[in-house]
């Protein structure tokens, strides 16, 4: 029963992703058709300037077909019954049409050249336009599909040319091969197979690069740059749930709701962005991970990701405390600068705890999120709230102080009960409006 339920959830997720891709294709269909039309108009101008008449009418007709196919994609993409597989069908049709255009002789040209001569003009290079265009979609499967279509259709065209009456396939050595090169009916099958293979390899490389770029883009939204490159190489970046000893830091703007009401939306969002930038800078310079922004607050972790812990760097708790003290100092300076500009001052408070955490994915098939959870996270959040009652700018647990090496700066406040938690904690902290910075390497 459980396995059947999991299979059903996977199928539902697959359908959901396909529907999402179809919606995105519908959204982009009109601008794509317009851009394609302008590109074809440019191609038509070039053709009219270089191709002889009346042969030019053939090329203009093919260009018109490309334009019509682009608008057909738009019309179909706007229908409710549109599905993502249709995008793959259009890519296949486009690639086949391009190969036909490059290989099939223009019937309006004088019939003095055999069809095999089409291979002498380097037209195959135009197929890489397909790869370049598909690369912009950042869809690895679609890029690879375009490569397969290009290799298959080009191979089919070579087979057609090689089986035409009069085609010459034999290769020789020395002068014999030189004479073959001068034969307009000669088809060098080995060279064409090599091109198809290279085209497929390039498409695979672009697809792999696109996959890595997508993973890196997603990871970079919440991980430091130094961790992104390693995690982006993994199909399941975070793997199974795991435990770690980490420092967890929470920040919040005191009284932000009242501030936002008084300032109005535009000024409030400006204040929020300034505060978020202040916190993000302090966390990044202490080599922490900015886990998430939560309304007007933020959560950061130190030591939760082993690949970030390099030799010679200060322990996670020491770096976390350095970040907390840095936030306190910078927040005080920022608040004074706001007052000097005639703007409303603001106060940022910080809670910090050190202990075991669990890392893993949470959510449902429709929406997954990587999370750091556990009692350590809850205690850090409660310490941040405790700053208001104790009039502190930074509240640190004794566990965090011990893991940081008992640095100077924070003072012992005493034992405090935390809301929703049976066991009290010993709190150390910095009194509000009297921040003191301690630097850690």
Image (tube, rainbow, N blue to C red):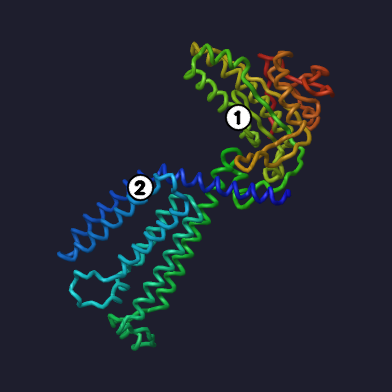
Counting the numbered discs, the total is 2
Residue at (23% x, 69% y) in the render:
106
Residue 331 occupies which quadrant of the picture?
top right
Q: Mark 1 or mark 2, which is nearer the start of the sequence?
A: 2
- Report the quarter where the C terminus lies: top right
x and y, in percent, of residue 425 in the image: 82, 23
Residue at (68% x, 46% y) in the render:
307
Q: Nearer the viewer, residue 138 or 441?
A: 138
Residue 231 shown left or right of residue 156 in the figure:
right
x and y, in percent, of residue 80 in the image: 43, 44
Residue at (60% x, 45% y) in the render:
228
Q: Nearer the viewer, residue 321 or 346?
A: 346
Q: Which residue is mark 2?
A: 75
Mark 2 burial class by Cα count in 10 Å: few <14, some 14-19, many 20+: some
Q: Nearer the viewer, residue 309 or 182?
A: 182
Residue 241 occupies which quadrant of the picture?
top right
Query: The residue tagged with tag 2: helix, strand or loop?
Result: helix
Query: The residue tagged with tag 1: helix, strand or loop?
Result: strand
x and y, in percent, of residue 265 in the image: 49, 18
Residue 274 occupies which quadrant of the picture?
top right
Q: Which residue is mark 1?
A: 293
């Amino acid at each position: 029963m459980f396995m059947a339920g999991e299979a059903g959830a996977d199928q539902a997720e697959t359908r959901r992703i396909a529907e999402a891709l179809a919606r995105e294709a519908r959204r982009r269909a009109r601008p794509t058709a317009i851009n394609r039309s302008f590109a074809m108009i440019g191609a038509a101008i070039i053709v009219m300037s270089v191709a002889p008449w009346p042969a030019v009418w053939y090329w203009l007709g093919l260009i018109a077909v490309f334009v019509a196919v682009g608008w057909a994609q738009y019309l179909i993409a706007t229908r409710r019954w549109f599905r993502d597989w249709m995008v793959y069908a259009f890519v296949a049709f486009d690639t086949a049409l391009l190969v036909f255009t490059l290989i099939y002789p223009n019937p309006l040209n004088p019939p003095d050249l055999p069809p095999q001569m089409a291979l002498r003009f380097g037209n195959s290079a135009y197929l890489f336009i397909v790869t370049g265009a598909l690369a912009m979609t950042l869809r690895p499967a679609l890029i690879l599909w375009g490569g397969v279509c290009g290799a298959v259709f080009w191979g089919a065209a070579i087979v057609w040319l090689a089986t035409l009456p009069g085609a010459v396939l034999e290769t020789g050595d020395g002068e014999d091969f030189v004479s073959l090169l001068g034969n307009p009916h000669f088809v060098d099958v080995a060279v064409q197979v090599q091109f198809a293979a290279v085209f497929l390899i390039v498409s695979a490389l672009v697809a792999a690069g696109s996959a890595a770029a997508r993973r890196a883009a997603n990871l970079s939204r919440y991980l430091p740059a130094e961790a992104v490159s390693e995690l982006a190489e993994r199909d399941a970046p975070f793997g199974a749930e795991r435990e770690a000893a980490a420092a967890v830091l929470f920040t919040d703007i005191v009284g932000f709701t009242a501030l936002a009401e008084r300032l109005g939306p535009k000024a409030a969002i400006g204040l929020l962005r300034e505060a978020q930038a202040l916190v993000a800078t302090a966390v990044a310079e202490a080599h922490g991970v900015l886990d998430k922004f939560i309304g007007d607050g933020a959560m950061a972790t130190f030591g939760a990701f082993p690949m970030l812990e390099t030799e010679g760097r200060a322990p996670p708790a020491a770096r976390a405390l350095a970040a907390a003290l840095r936030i306190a100092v910078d927040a005080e300076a920022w608040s004074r600068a706001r007052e000097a500009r005639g703007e409303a001052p603001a106060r940022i408070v910080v809670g910090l705890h050190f202990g075991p955490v669990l890392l893993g994915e949470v959510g449902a098939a429709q929406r997954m999120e990587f999370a750091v959870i556990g009692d350590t996270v809850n205690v850090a959040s409660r310490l941040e709230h405790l700053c208001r009652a104790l009039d502190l700018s930074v509240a640190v647990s004794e566990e965090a102080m011990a893991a940081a090496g008992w640095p100077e700066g924070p003072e012992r406040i005493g034992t405090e009960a935390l809301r929703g938690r049976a066991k009290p904690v010993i709190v150390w902290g910095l009194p509000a409006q009297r921040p003191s910075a301690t630097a850690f390497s």
